[in-house]
């Protein structure tokens, strides 16, 4: 792994790498009822019970996972191709921006009267 030096495995790339783990912990603390409930199993298998999203957010759990993975991938490619540093707080912030845009879109849809 170019970030932590461990073997780049299927689990390490999105999850086990310490800088990426920090991203997941930050996002989970912001959007999940219990951030400690988030496990690699939730990323690797989209079936089964999911951790509960805070009631204040109208964003499905899988969308939170997808947005966080997108932010991690984008940052990873910036490390590889642009020689940028991987800043976990910046990556988490990018994920949160995308998640909040989805939330805002859902909130607008719920506020519209039915035709």
Image (spheres, rainbow, N blue to C red):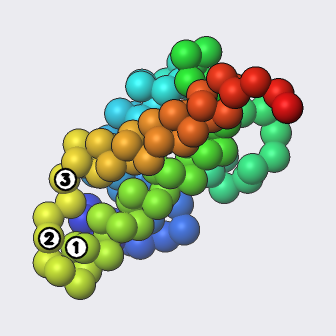
- Which residue is tagged 2? 84
**Going by the picture, which residue comes out furthest to the front?**
115
**Residue position for label 3:** 87
Q: In which quarter of the image is the C terminus?
A: top right
Q: Residue drawn at (76%, 24%), measured in percent from left and top?
A: 113
Along the viewing direction, whichever of 7 and 103 lies nearer the viewer: 103
Quick one: label 2, few (<14), some, or many (20+) residues within 10 Å? few
Q: Upstream in the sequence, badge 1 or badge 3?
A: 1
| Cα distance in 3D space between marks 2 and 3 | 9 Å
Q: Quadrant of the N terminus?
A: bottom left
Q: What element carries label 2?
A: loop
Marks 1,2: beta carbons within 8 A: yes
Q: How far across and down, in percent of the image, does residue 98 sit? A: 44, 47
Residue situated furthest bottom in the rendering: 81
Give the left or right position of residue 14, taking residue 81 as reference. Answer: right
Residue nearest the viewer, comparing 89 with 25? 89
Residue 79 circle label: 1
Residue at x 60% of width, y 28% of height: 107
Indicate the position of residue 22 as horizontal and vertical percent values. Answer: 32, 41
Res 78 → quadrant:
bottom left
C-alpha span from label 1 to label 3: 10 Å
Q: Which residue is drawn at 24% across and 65% down?
A: 3
Q: Where is residue 21 in the image (x, y as percent from the top left)?
A: 38, 45
Of the residues under marks 1 and 2, which one precedes in the sequence? 1
Left or right of 100, for residue 105? right
């Amino acid at each position: 792994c170019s970030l932590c030096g461990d073997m780049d495995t299927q689990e390490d790339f999105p999850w086990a790498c310490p800088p990426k783990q920090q991203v997941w912990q930050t996002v989970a603390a912001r959007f999940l009822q219990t951030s400690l409930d988030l496990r690699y199993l939730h990323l690797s298998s989209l079936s089964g019970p999911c951790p509960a999203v805070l009631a204040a957010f109208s964003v499905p759990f899988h969308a939170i996972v997808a947005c966080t993975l997108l932010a991690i991938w984008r940052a990873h490619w910036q490390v590889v191709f642009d020689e940028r540093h991987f800043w976990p707080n910046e990556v988490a912030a990018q994920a949160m921006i995308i998640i909040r845009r989805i939330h805002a879109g859902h909130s607008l849809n719920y506020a519209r009267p039915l035709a």
